[in-house]
Image (cartoon, rainbow, N blue to C red):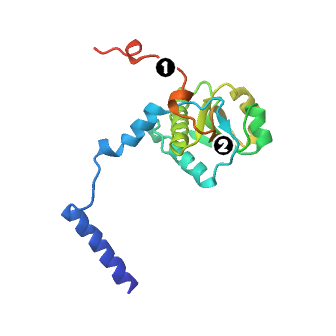
Amino acid sequence: MKKSSLTMCILFVALLIVSGNVPRLNAQEANQGAVTNLTTHYAAGRNFTAGTISRSDIEKILAAGVRAPSANNRQPWHFTVVQTPALAKRIVSNITDGNILIIISAAGDGKTNGPAILDCGLATESIYLAAQALGYGSRIYTGPMNTVNGLKTELGLPSGYSAVALVRVGRLDPPVDATSAASARKSLDTMVTYK
């Protein structure tokens, strides 16, 4: 009986698709949310507030990093999630309770492996944007990499890897929005040349 019900369900869905009764999004429609997220994001700065982040949301954020593009699909990154408050405070001194740090590492010394570092940069931005898409604040840091790399063993970074960036993720004080919290940006006409 179960097999018959499953078969009927599959046939019904196929009939809907063939008849055109299932709404279909073209690539432009499907990606409008991504464009909105890209054009309205901001670094939360000092607006973080206490509160935990669910494991399910952390995994969604990390999945965005895993899906980032990389040269020849090498995926040269490793992600380390720092949830221990004392350890996180050693890296970012003004961390707020419940914030996490996601460290992005690349094979090598973190300075001379250019393609891997660029790929890790793409993963970093994907993590940063995914956190904001889920309603969290996020901020990219590259300054504390010497501190992070000095804690490789304690952080469990893989052998032969070095940290290249980290993303702080946390809850925000409402009502924070992209307009009031964003830093000023240069105008497009000062940074773009058309030929």
The residue singled out by tag 1 in the image is 185
- Looking at this view, name the residue that lies furthest to the front: 175
Could you tell me residue 35's position as x and y percent? 39, 36
Residues packed near mark 2 inside 10 Å, few (<14), some (14 to 19) or many (20 plus): some
- Residue 187, by quadrant, is top left
Q: Earlier in the sequence, mark 2 or mark 1?
A: 2
Could you tell me residue 91's position as x and y percent? 74, 33
- Looking at this view, name the residue that lies furthest to the right: 86
Element type at mark 1: loop
Using the image as rendered, state which of residue 164 and residue 86 is in the foreground: 86
Left or right of residue 91, residue 12 in this image: left
- Residue 82, by quadrant, is top right
Element type at mark 2: strand
The residue singled out by tag 2 in the image is 80
Using the image as rendered, state which of residue 49 and residue 189 is in the foreground: 49
Could you tell me residue 85's position as x and y percent? 77, 42
Residues packed near mark 1 inside 10 Å, few (<14), some (14 to 19) or many (20 plus): few
Left or right of residue 111, residue 13 in this image: left
Does the rendering let one see residue 115? no
- Residue 56, by quadrant, is bottom right
Residue positioned 54% across, 50% down in the render:
60
